[in-house]
Image: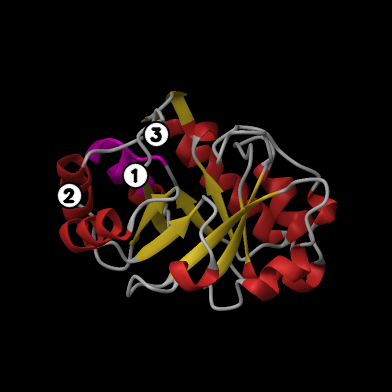
Amino acid sequence: MRTRVKICGITRPEDAEAAVHAGADAIGLVFYPPSPRHVELAQAVEIARGLPPFVTTVGLFVNADAETIAEVVAEVGIDLIQFHGNECPDYCASHGRPWIRALRMKDDIDLEAEAGRFAAARGILLDAYRPGVPGGTGETFDWSRIPPALAHRIVLAGGLNPDNVEQAVRQVRPFAVDVSGGVESEPGIKDADRIARFMAAVRRGDEAR
């Protein structure tokens, strides 16, 4: 099975175009003001309007209120919501869109229990843990901590880049991988060559699965 790819933290239409050209399945728009990859509503609308059919538009939120999420979903045309804060399952499911739940890999996390708690999610995104940072740390975690039985639900994130994603795909066999900083020239600015190299590495990993 082919590993799907999301390029997250898109802030410019030309970066979305580069991601699509390289074969990305989804692009991520960050609606979390403290992030250097945060996009304003008008900026997100411009990016989303330039996407072709069958490329998923993902909106990333961190403990956002329901009104904010509703406005973004309506104006941008978000296909899938990604929750990175302390949102409970009922809240995640209350916005009329498919959703995925991001979990940070704390030392004491029980992944199987958390996956069961968020059983209604389309998938579980796994990211590295750093205290006080909801995601986008640019750090990896020990992939061997992921139970193989969960691989089909996993969107693997956390420090992925063109140099390590092939091994990640081979080892974890996730449904999808998610990259942001690993394909950037600076925070929020994607590099088309790095995106292309990342996609090529994912394909090599798939060939070895």
Q: Earlier in the sequence, mark 3 or mark 1?
A: 1
Which residue does the numbered mark 3 point to in the structure image? 192
Q: CA distance from mark 2 to mark 3?
A: 21 Å
Residue at image location 45% in from the left, 67% down from the top: 92
Residue 5 shown left or right of residue 23 in the figure: right
Q: What element does badge 3 sit on?
A: helix
**Structural crowding at the residue carrying mark 2, measured as other residues with C-alpha within 10 Å and reported as few (<14), some (14–19) or many (≥20):** some
Numbered range of the magenta stretch: 9-19
> x, y percentage for residue 127?
64, 47
> x, y percentage for residue 94?
38, 73
Contact? badges 3 and 1 (CB < 8 Å)? no
Residue 104 shown left or right of residue 109 in the figure: left
Question: Residue 44, located in which quarter of the rendered image?
Answer: top left
**Structural crowding at the residue carrying mark 3, measured as other residues with C-alpha within 10 Å and reported as few (<14), some (14–19) or many (≥20):** many
Question: What amino acid is at disc 3?
Answer: Ala
> x, y percentage for residue 109?
78, 55
Question: What amino acid is at disc 2?
Answer: Val
Circle nearer the viewer, 3 or 1: 1
Out of 31 and 181, give the one closest to the viewer.
31
Q: CA distance from mark 2 to mark 1?
A: 12 Å
Out of 180 and 92, give the one closest to the viewer.
92
Residue 51 shown left or right of residue 176 in the figure: left
Question: Residue 174, located in which quarter of the rendered image?
Answer: bottom right
**Residue 31, disc:** 1
Residue at image location 32% in from the left, 66% down from the top: 79
Which residue does the numbered mark 2 point to in the structure image? 45
- Is residue 50 located in the magenta-colored stretch of the structure? no
Question: Residue 182, located in which quarter of the rendered image?
Answer: top right
Out of 124 and 132, give the one closest to the viewer.
132
**Image position of 149 with respect to 202: above or below:** below
